[in-house]
Amino acid sequence: MRGSRVGEKKQSDSRRGLGATGAAAGAAGPAPSVQDATAAMSQLSMQERPPAATGGPQRPLSRGRARGRASEGGSATRPGAAAAPVPAVAAAPAQASREVRPAAFEGLMAGGGNGDAPQRVRGRARAQMLVQRLHTRPEHIVSKKGYSGSQITLQANYFKLDMPKDWELLQYRVDFNPEQDLTSIRKYLLRTLRPELGAFLFDGTVLFTTNRLTNDVKEVREMMTQRQDGENVRVSLRLVGMMAAGDYQYLQFFNILLRQCMRHLHLQLVGRNFYDAKAKIVVPEFHMELWPGYITSIRQHESSILLCADTSLKLMRKDTALSLLEDFHSKDPRNYKHLFSAAVIGAVVLTDYNNRTYRVHDVAYDMSPEHTFDMKSGEKVSFKDYYRKRYNLNIICGTQPMLITRPAARERRAGAADIICLVPELCRLTGLTEAMRQDFKLMRTLATYSRASPDARMKQIVNYAKRLNSEAEVQKELDKWGLGLKPELVTLNGRILSYEKIVQENGKYEPSQLVDWTRDMRSRTLLVVPRLNCWAIIFQAKARRDVEPFIKSLITASRGMGWNLPEPELIGLPDDRSGTYVQSIETSIQKANPDLLMLIVPNNNSARYSSIKKKCCLDRGVPSQVVVNRSVTGKGVMSVATKIAVQICCKLGGAPWSVEIPLTGLMVVGFDVSPDTAKKGQNFGALVASVDPACTRYFSTVNACASGEELSNHLAISMIKALHKYREHNNGQLPNRIVIYRDGVGEGMLPYVWEIEVQGVRRRLEEIFNKSGTALHMAFIVVTKRINTRLFMKGDNPAPGTIVDDVVTLPERYDFFLVSQSVRQGTVGPTSYHVLYDNLGLDPDKLQRLTYKMTHLYYNWSGTVRVPAACQYAHKLAVLTAQAVHQPSHKHLEDVLFFL
């Protein structure tokens, strides 16, 4: 079953600990992380964030899609892949009766010596091909290696592919006479010629092999074979050429072959990855299972083709869509249809009988398993009888509605039905609901399984390679192609950058080895102390006994950092309704016009949080701090008070610390995008830019844009606003250098970002700089956190400040990996930095060091974080806007970090 990434401790790589929830039928969604329960509880007061909604559809936690291709009758399934027909509803006029027919789904992957290969390149595959061909390494970057820091030896979760020096992959065009329309028939015909062809992969038109079947491109080799019905067919092969290492098809071949080998390990393909159902971990108290598995890929790296392998856990829920429907019906018989539709539409379900995942697009309440459809033979059969005969499954509830899913356009072009019907009783739910995310015990339990230590993770990854090399069928498969796999992890050189000195009002100091300066900060004066003349605290009157001691702790903590907070006005409320809080905010503003409002709420209610933020951020433009009541009581209250004091300092325009930045005239920009949870098809792009030499003051802006709409114009407009604001703070001067960190970019988006965003922003900025008679010096860097690369130093996590810029980086890119954060549990995850554009005049070493410096300046955490601060600020602003307020905030707030 599709799983969720759970158990992610703050700044840890445990986001990769559990496998991702996929989306079916070509619909892919973003992958928001799920905070580990312990970390979430400890950070509630420090890092204010919108509480999760209690209702609404379950969200998948990562990208994915239904595997394979549909065709009528189930007869054209790919040999070697399990046939998996599901009843499908053909497109029909709304007034006409629905015509239903079964559709067979092929597995996406098959291959090896039996001659199968992926379908023609479409959609995501085409995007991947463009990514492979995208060469972004600037000509002036002869070497992208840095030199600062201490040299260290590391291991990475990569294995070298072993092949002869003269190994070559040949591509042949295949033609049929008479022409064969069905790909499945073409593949069958090629398989009959296997003794003459040897090992090959065939996608329906092009054949890949290491055997020279012709001498040159002019020669045509012809062979005769027969269809299953006895018709003779002439097969002609013409050499197209030899594939170059690094070509899309060249690397695709290796990935197909690897997946074929994975099948020999008796693992189960779920979504894109393989999992071991026999080694499952049962979590009975929550009706879930965890399946261990592997995430793998093969790619051309600096000097070798390397296999990247990482461990994964897939969360498998046991409850079905029918059980959810029954639950809604028992709780609200009048409104259960609305509740059920809201919960399942957009969600991803798994069908065990064919191990496929589908995204639900609609619910057909006028249909049931008793509904009949026409088989290919012309026989009418009900869904109930179909599943009983085909899969030996007895459907108990005959009155349940049917779930509707619509295959992607590429799958319909390949022969899939327009509509596929699913029986809720046979559909297991996937992903974590918002209620589950708020369940402390559940999240803590899942986290205990997902956070493997570095040493344990290394052993699991090495055991995977040993398992491949010890399986006879795998060796047989590799031998066909003259290939092998080195069993040792790749060893490489890295560097650890020196500690950055933390700058506060009364001096500089180095942080601890974990790059955490929380204790040092408590007794040192804030770098910039903000002005706070009047403020108010709004809370439930019955919580006064908890609130008053907390206020004293807050004032004491602030005084220790050189900030004398005045006594706030205390406003007790009779209840916790959203309207009561909103009215109290308005009354307080009209009465005293406070500089800041703190609101202490009893729990994480998303509707109330949204109402508070809309009132403060949109209507009145006043900084606000929302704190959950449980955070202000119990042990550790002084720690909570210190963190909240720092947070409200930033929301008022202050700055707690900085680092030494030797570059003058520097502007650092972060940009991120988040989908609007209130309006389907709308996204919010948030930009946050530094406006002072120390990168402690920021300008922020948000733009709404429709999904699919070009972001370049919005990004360019936001950058122009940021430049105007920079000039206001710097005597009319433009920045000498601009570094843009772009988050939220998937591999398939890189060509778009390069062609549209980078070039569009550069052109608009050059217009402004040219008018001022100065040259634009800019770098545009894509930041990627969700990667499979893992680095190990002597069986442990690398220290913060670790840089890797060779061996596992890519030759066509200007890129590097940086481990900037420290994790206390689990395996740390490096962040990938891909420099798409650069004319700063800085060598790679200085750009790496600058990036590391920027990870020290995120004021919600007195330590380093996984990405540059501006990037994280943009993420926070985008999420607040998309999940809570749903439109750009008041202009009065654009000069402060009000969204922390």
Image: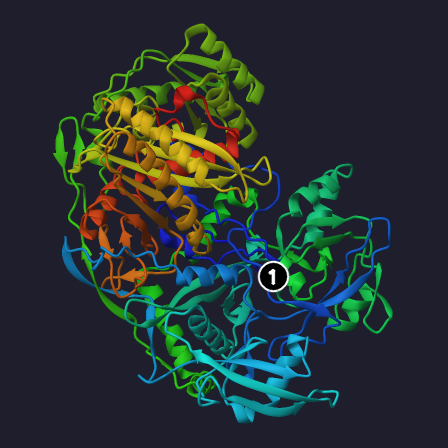
**Helix, strand or loop status at disc 1:** loop
* Residue under the image location 50 percent in, 10 percent down: 587
Residue 80, percent from left and from top: 60, 79
Give the quadrant of the C terminus.
top left
Q: Nearer the viewer, residue 319 or 860?
A: 860
385 relative position to 321: left or right: right
- The type of colouring in the image is rainbow
Farthest residue toward the top? 591
Q: Amino acid at mark 1?
A: Ala
Residue closest to the eye, 851 or 249: 249
| Residue 224: x %, y % from top left | 63, 92
User: Measured from the top left, where is residue 663 in percent x and y?
Assistant: 17, 38
- Residue for badge 1: 66
How many other residues sit within 10 Å of disc 1, few (<14), some (14-19) or many (≥20)? many
Identify the image quadrant of the N terminus. Answer: bottom right
Q: Residue at x 34, y 28 (%)?
A: 699
Residue 847 in sight from this viewpoint: yes
